[in-house]
Amino acid sequence: MMDQNLYSKKIIPYLDGSLSASERSEFEAYVHTHPEFESQIRTKEDELAIVRSLIPTPLIAREALDALETEIRESIMNLLRDEPRNLRGKIKDAWEEWLSR
Amino acid sequence: MKLMKRIEFFQLVQPLTEKLYSMAFALVPDDLQAEQLVIDSMNAFLLKEKKLVLNKLVDLESKKNAQLLRRTYYKSILRYMCEIGVRRSHQMGETSLVQPAENFRAFFALDPKVRFVMKLRFEGQFTAQEIEEIVQLPKYEVIEKLHNGRFLLLNDLNRGVHL
C-alpha cells in the first residue's frame, strides 16, 4: 500500500518527463508488475489530454509563413558570416548569396 | 565532416519556422507580434552564437545527425525567445488591445513564463531537464510552473462547468 502511494505520487512527474532515467525505469518496472496501477495512470493521462486541449496551437497562414521564412533566410545570410578578409572572400560570399536565391 | 554553410544552416532550421511561431504565440498572442518575436529570437541567436555555428564541424549527410543538430539549435533559439518574449509579454500586458480567443482565455491569463513552460512540455514534448535549459530556471521551479499551470487551467475549466 505504501508502495502504491509512493508510486501514485510519481505518475505526473513520470508523464511530465521530470523523473530521472533511473527513477523512470524503476517506475516502469513497478507498473509492469502491478497492472492494476495502469488505470491510475490512464486517469492522469486523460487529465493531461484535457490540459493539452486548453493550450492554443495557432496556425500561420501560408503567405505569412513564406514571408517569415524569407526574413529568416535574410537574417541568416546577413548575420551568419565572417567578415571577408580579401577579394576572394567577398566573391565567395556574393556567390553563396546568389546561389541561395 | 565539414564546416556548415549559411544556406545549409537555413535549410536545417527552415522546418522549425512554424513551431517557433506557435511557441512565440504563447508569449505574445498576436500574429504580427509573434512573427516579430520569431525574427528577433533568431537574430539574437545568430548574433550571439555565430562563431559556434560557423566553426562547428557537421555531417549533414546523416539524417540522424541533422535531426539532432536541428533540435539543439531549436532549443537555443527558444532560449532567446523566452528571454525576449517574457519581457515583451509583460510590456504588452499593459498596453495590448488584442483579446485572446474565449476558449484560451485561462491560458493567456497565466504568467508568461508558465505559459511558455506549458507549451514547451505539451506541444514541444521537451523533458523537464530540457525545459530547465531553455527557460534557465532550476528544475524544481520548472516542475512548480508545470504543476501550477495544470492546476489553474483545470480549476478554471471546473469553475466554468459548475457555473
Image: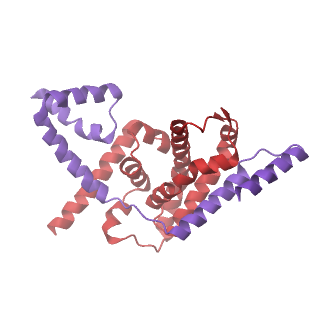
Chain colours: A purple, B red
Q: Position of residue B85 (x, y in %)?
A: 52, 56
Q: Quadrant of residue A41?
A: top left
Q: Is residue B141 above or below residue B44?
A: above
Q: Position of residue B112 (x, y in %)?
A: 43, 56
Q: Name the residue rendered at 66%, 44% in the picture.
A: B48
Image-based side of A90 in relation to A32, left or right: right
Q: Is residue B43 above or below residue A39?
A: below
Q: Name the residue rendered at 46%, 59% in the picture.
A: B22
Residue furthest to the bottom in view is B97
Q: Position of residue A50 (x, y in %)?
A: 25, 56
Q: Position of residue B15 (x, y in %)?
A: 53, 53
Image-based side of B25 in relation to B143, left or right: right
Image-based side of B88 in relation to B8, left or right: left
Say which of A88 and A9 sits in front: A88
**Number of numbered callouts drawn:** 0
Image-based side of B94 in relation to A24, left or right: right
Q: Is residue B141 above or below residue B160?
A: above
Say which of A64 and A27 sits in front: A64
